[in-house]
Image (cartoon, helix red, strand yellow):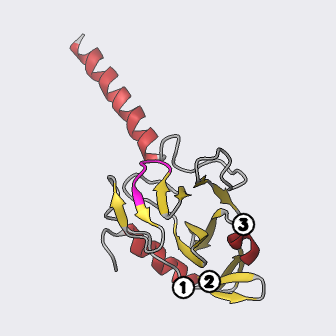
Amino acid sequence: MVARVALTLMLIATIVAIGCASGGTGGTPEPNDGGDTNGTGVVNPTWIDAQVEGNVASIPTGEVDSGKMLHFRVTDQGTSMAFMAYRLDGERYVRANICPPCRSEGFSLAGDILDCNNCHTKFEASTGEGISGACKDYPKAEVAYAIVGDKVTMDINALVNAYRDTEKAGLP
């Protein structure tokens, strides 16, 4: 009987661990229109495809400037990395889109706050620095970009460096 209870508890713990490792139900939100759809002032993410040519990734400037919270992926040497782009107070921002402790790849923009869609840790949208929550020690590193024509262009190495900086606690 004791063995059966222990086995049941181990099975439950394994199921919970697998759910947490996959980011739970809120880790990567489903695509939507990226706007404030419910009148709360929260801009939910919209996943888009980045164009990658050589060592440069790009996304449409118009999409960033539209008020959407854009999420996109770039793969380098077999590693898929998530990023976010948004406009705040007339400035464009591109940042790594990961919350390492809770394994989320999803943030919403609530005013000037980045809100992790999984653990709800809050970050300053203008600096990427943590404000509150369990994962606040993992600031969202900014990616340098250039505007070329109608595209926001980013060097793959800059994207990789920002992603790696965000995987580590503290500012680089």
Q: Secondary structure at mark 1?
A: loop
In-front residue for pair 118/55: 118
Location of residue 3 with respect to 150 vertically, above or below: above
Any magenta on residue 77?
Answer: no
Q: Residue furthest left?
A: 2
Most frequent secondary structure within the magenta stretch: loop
Residue at which label 1 appears = 144
Q: Amino acid at mark 3?
A: Asp
Q: Which mark is residue 154?
A: 2
**Circle 1 crowding by C-alpha within 10 Å: few under 14, some 14–19, many from 20:** some
Q: Residue at x 73, y 69 (%)?
A: 63
In the image, taking residue 111 as reference, residue 148 lies left or right, namely right
- Spatial CA distance of label 3 from label 1 is 19 Å
Disc nearer the start of the sequence (3/2): 3
Any magenta on residue 121?
Answer: yes
In-front residue for pair 121/56: 121
Query: Which quadrant of the figure contains the N terminus?
Result: top left
Query: Which quadrant of the figure contains the C terminus?
Result: bottom left
Residue contact at pointers 3 and 2, CB within 8 angstroms: no
Q: Residue at x 64, y 46 (%)?
A: 39
Horizontal and vertical percent position of residue 92: 60, 77
Residue at which label 3 appears = 49
**Circle 3 crowding by C-alpha within 10 Å: few under 14, some 14–19, many from 20:** some
Disc nearer the start of the sequence (3/1): 3
- Magenta stretch in the rendered image: 117-122
Kindly indicate the quadrant of the structure image that contains residue 18. top left
Q: Secondary structure at mark 2?
A: strand
Location of residue 38 with respect to 60 vertically, above or below: above
In-front residue for pair 120/65: 65
Kindly indicate the quadrant of the structure image that contains residue 171. bottom left
